[in-house]
Image (cartoon, rainbow, N blue to C red):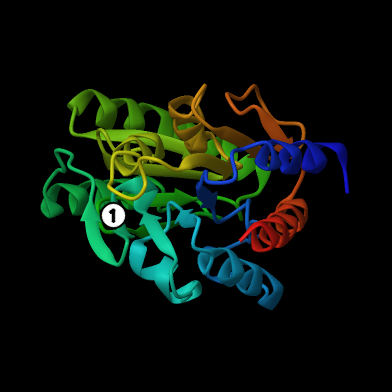
């Protein structure tokens, strides 16, 4: 066990015995390795097992957070007792009840027009594809060659500036992906709301994430909980701890489950 995991387990152990935990887990890049396409990022049986153990504990609420749609999250992790935040926190299933982040979403027609515009602008380039989501859409370019990626961004930059200035949408840039979402949507905004929910407000929050889109959650929880950045050689972060890859995250979660089961 590395020192960072030891420090995290020690921090959990130091909490009062009657203090429950609210554990937020990003999916891609945190629970599983990032795959060339989202549908290829499958959870292992071991991961599903440890998430089931955690979700069954009486003193812990477990929330998986992702840019993926709520529907997709529920399909890939059909675990009893699990809570979900999809579309970067815009939609969720919390305590078994549907939940939506209140934001000024643009119309479906506007979203479809933006998606059509981008597809036309990039039509002569390769290595990219568009993913339609409930409130927005994402441009994936993980399969683009370096030279093609440069060409994509030469076209993409001015268009993104235009979309941002229009005011209804925001741009979220992640690992080889750019997402266009309604303004006001973020994982941090969603978590601020979840922390006010009855049954959640008294729990100690812990958040694990690997991407730029997780920084808003790290900032919300500064001075309030534990925040853990997953990955190596990355830019500055608001998180207070770090783990190097999803395998370490699974090791941490397994040890945490064992500790909490003994405490229970």
Q: Quadrant of the C terminus?
A: bottom right
Residue drawn at (66%, 25%), measured in percent from left and top? Answer: 235
Q: Is disc 1 surrounded by few (<14), some (14 to 19) or many (20+) residues within 10 Å?
A: many
* Left or right: 112 as drawn, with respect to 33: left
Identity of the residue drawn at 49% across and 40% down: 205
Residue 215: x %, y % from top left: 51, 31
Q: Nearer the viewer, residue 43 or 10?
A: 10
Measured along the vertical axis of the image, is residue 127 above or below residue 88? below
Q: Is residue 183 above or below residue 106?
A: above
Viewer can see residue 43: no
Residue 132 position by quadrant: bottom left
Residue 128 x/y as whole percent: 50, 54
Residue 204 placement, left or right of 36: left
Q: Nearer the viewer, residue 171 or 205?
A: 205
Q: Is residue 89 above or below residue 221?
A: below
Q: Secondary structure at mark 1?
A: strand
Does 54 sit left or right of 193 as displayed? right
| Residue 108: image location, x then y, percent | 14, 54
Taking the spot 58% from the left edge, 43% from the top edge, the residue there is 209
Would residue 189 be found to the left or right of residue 98 on screen? Answer: right
Q: Residue at x 19, y 27 (%)?
A: 167
> Which is nearer the eye, 122 or 257?
257
Find disc 1 in the rendering and name its residue.
Answer: 91
Q: Can residue 235 be seen from the camera position used here?
A: yes
Query: Relative to the observer, which residue lies in front, 150 or 224?
Result: 224
Tally of marks: 1
């Amino acid at each position: 066990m590395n020192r960072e995991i030891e420090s995290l387990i020690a921090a959990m152990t130091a909490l009062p015995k009657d203090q429950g935990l609210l554990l937020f887990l990003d999916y891609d890049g945190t629970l599983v390795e990032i795959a060339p396409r989202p549908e290829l990022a499958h959870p292992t049986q071991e991961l599903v097992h440890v998430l089931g153990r955690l979700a069954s504990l009486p003193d812990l609420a477990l929330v998986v957070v992702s840019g993926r749609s709520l529907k997709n999250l529920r399909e890939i992790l059909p675990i009893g007792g699990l809570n979900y935040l999809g579309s970067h926190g815009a939609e969720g299933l919390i305590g078994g009840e549907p939940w939506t982040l209140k934001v000024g979403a643009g119309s479906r027609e506007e979203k479809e027009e933006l998606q059509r515009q981008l597809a036309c602008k990039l039509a002569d380039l390769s290595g990219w594809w568009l993913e339609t989501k409930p409130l927005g859409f994402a441009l994936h370019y993980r399969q683009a060659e370096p030279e093609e990626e440069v060409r994509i961004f030469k076209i993409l930059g001015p268009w993104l500036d235009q979309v941002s200035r229009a005011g209804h949408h925001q741009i979220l840039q992640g690992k080889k992906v750019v997402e266009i979402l309604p303004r006001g949507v973020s994982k941090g905004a969603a978590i601020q709301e979840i922390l006010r929910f009855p049954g959640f407000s008294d729990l100690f929050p812990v958040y694990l994430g690997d991407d730029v889109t997780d920084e808003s959650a790290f900032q919300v929880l500064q001075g309030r909980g534990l925040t853990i950045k997953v990955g190596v050689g990355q830019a500055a972060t608001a998180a207070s701890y770090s783990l190097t890859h999803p395998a370490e995250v699974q090791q941490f979660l397994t040890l945490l489950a064992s500790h909490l089961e003994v405490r229970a």
